[in-house]
Image: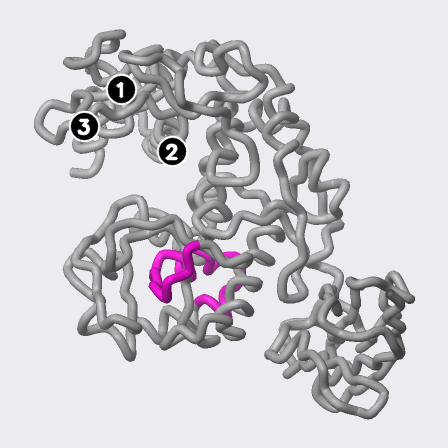
């Protein structure tokens, strides 16, 4: 039965030997090594004491604690062991007197060679759990250090905190429901982390439609760029901006984003199932990745890629993982210490009722300017999409740039235009969306 298997796993992590030696230990300071031997659950491959992998493990442990809420001895024991494993973790030691949490530690070399976790990436869940620890909590200043590394950029009309591989926008969201809460940084931006992940997902879709490197298969119904197997081994890939994009498509990227953009991501899932099932599907689900340019199909099925797909599908269907995880008092304490507060007024709910094209800013400009536009809802409720083009023309009516050329849902957008390759002068930019069309003038002054 599932609960007996979970109990055995909890017992292993609680009773496995902890200590500072180079071998014969499962972890140290309450945390765990990145890789453990399958036969003895002890350190292998000279791996590091990994804070992020401990954090991801802990998220699963807390979720199991919430799930098994029965009064019998087995489920009571599961909850007790979950708390014991969590409360033994010394997150403060893993700061090594720094502002943030260190990435790793080794018995041979200590913290040498490891930096601090700074945003934005998958480590958000780790910081929340470290802040919420009732025994070894990190100071709230650690959260400020984490957010100090954020990069807010605009790609394909979407403005968001950038981290090119999609897994960084998914892992923390497997457990924490960020839809209606925001910290200081997100309140300043006027959105939530959930909306941020939605924008990152849609920006990657837009990048794949644009397909700047001409990879076979990339389209609105087939995309997915994240860390995974590749034909040459392993690579942490992402976009936008492009990072090691070699044409490999990874099913976990779109499927683990289904809650953020269900229409767009389910379309990819249908393509994977209907058109590519035979080479992709096996007894454990989709293989890790494939590359149509070289005709390569991964032979691996990787748990850290399969897990988020299962969890996020369940969150999309029922919200059950979010609902039970968010009831944990330690999780709530961590969110409170990071100054998360409830919010219902985020940009994702503001569906414009009208189409519009704003004046670019700055204007005149040299060499870059920003153009904002809105795709209105004809029914007033949203949920629609329009084929949108935004093009730039010179005074002779010749097209000099295409900034947008895709179907976009109702919403407000902004796109940056870099005219470094154009001469000074007057230019016109035209937005077309369905039957709507509007043109404005801008001046490039060098």
Front one among 105 and 59: 105
Residue 412 at x, y percent in the picture? 74, 66
Front one among 83 and 441: 441
Q: Residues within 10 Å of mark 2 (few under 14, many from 20)?
A: some
In the rendered image, which residue does mark 3 sit on? 45
In the rendered image, which residue does mark 1 sit on? 77
Q: Is residue 195 magenta?
A: no
Mark 2 and mark 1 lie on one chain; the one further toward the N terminus is 2
Mark 1 and mark 3 lie on one chain; the one further toward the N terminus is 3
Q: Is residue 259 magenta?
A: yes
Q: Residue at x 42, y 12 (%)?
A: 90
Front one among 12 and 105: 105
**In the displayed structure, would residue 278 be above or below residue 328?**
below
Q: Residues within 10 Å of mark 3 (few under 14, many from 20)?
A: few
Q: CA distance from mark 1 to mark 3?
A: 32 Å
Mark 2 and mark 3 lie on one chain; the one further toward the N terminus is 3
Front one among 436 and 176: 436
The nearer-to-camera label among 1 and 3 is 3
Dividing the picture into quadrants, the one containing residue 147 is top right
Q: CA distance from mark 2 to mark 1?
A: 21 Å
Q: Is residue 358 visible?
A: yes
- Left or right position of 70 against 282: right
Q: Residue at x 24, y 21 (%)?
A: 13
In the rendered image, which residue does mark 2 sit on? 56
Q: CA distance from mark 2 to mark 3?
A: 20 Å
Q: Which mark is residue 411?
A: none
Q: Secondary structure at mark 2?
A: helix
Q: Magenta part of the protein: which range?
A: 244-265
Residue 429 at x, y percent in the picture? 80, 79
């Amino acid at each position: 039965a599932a609960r007996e298997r979970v109990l055995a796993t909890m017992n292993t992590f609680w009773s496995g030997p902890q200590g500072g030696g180079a071998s014969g230990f499962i972890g140290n300071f309450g945390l765990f090594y990145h890789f453990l031997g399958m036969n003895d659950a002890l350190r292998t491959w000279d791996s590091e004491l990994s804070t992020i992998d401990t954090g991801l493990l802990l998220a699963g442990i807390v979720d199991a604690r919430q799930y098994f809420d029965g009064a019998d001895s087995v489920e009571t024991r599961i909850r007790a062991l979950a708390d014991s494993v969590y409360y033994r973790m010394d997150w403060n030691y893993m700061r090594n007197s720094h502002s943030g949490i260190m990435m790793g530690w080794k018995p041979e070399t200590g913290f040498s060679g490891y930096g601090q976790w700074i945003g934005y990436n998958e480590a958000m869940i780790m910081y929340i759990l470290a802040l919420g620890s009732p025994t070894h909590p990190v100071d709230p200043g650690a959260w400020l250090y984490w957010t100090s590394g954020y990069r807010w950029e605009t790609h394909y009309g979407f403005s968001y905190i950038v981290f090119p591989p999609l897994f960084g926008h998914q892992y923390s969201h497997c457990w924490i429901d960020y839809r209606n809460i925001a910290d200081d940084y997100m309140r300043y931006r006027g959105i939530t982390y959930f909306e941020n992940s939605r924008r990152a997902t849609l920006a990657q879709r837009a990048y794949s439609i644009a397909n700047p490197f001409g990879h076979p298969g990339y389209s609105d119904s087939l995309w997915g760029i994240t860390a995974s197997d590749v034909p040459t081994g392993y690579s942490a890939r992402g976009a936008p901006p492009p990072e090691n994009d070699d044409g490999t498509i990874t099913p976990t990227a779109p499927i683990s984003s289904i809650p953020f953009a269900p229409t767009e991501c389910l379309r990819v899932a249908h393509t994977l199932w209907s058109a590519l099932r035979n080479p992709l599907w096996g007894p454990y689900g989709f293989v890790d990745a494939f590359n149509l340019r070289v005709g390569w199909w991964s032979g691996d099925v990787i748990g850290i890629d399969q897990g988020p797909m299962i969890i996020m599908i369940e969150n999309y269907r029922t919200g059950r993982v979010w609902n039970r995880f968010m009831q944990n008092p330690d999780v709530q304490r961590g969110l409170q210490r990071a100054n998360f507060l409830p919010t219902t007024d985020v940009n994702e709910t503001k569906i414009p009722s009208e189409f519009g094209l704003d004046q670019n800013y700055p204007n005149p400009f040299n060499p870059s300017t920003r153009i904002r536009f809105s795709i209105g809802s004809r029914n007033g409720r949203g949920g629609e999409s329009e084929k949108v083009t935004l093009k730039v023309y010179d005074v002779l009516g010749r097209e000099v740039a295409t900034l947008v050329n895709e179907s976009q849902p109702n919403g407000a957008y902004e796109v940056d235009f870099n005219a470094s390759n154009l001469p000074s002068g007057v230019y016109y930019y035209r937005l077309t969306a369905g039957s709507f069309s509007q043109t404005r003038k801008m001046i490039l002054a060098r």
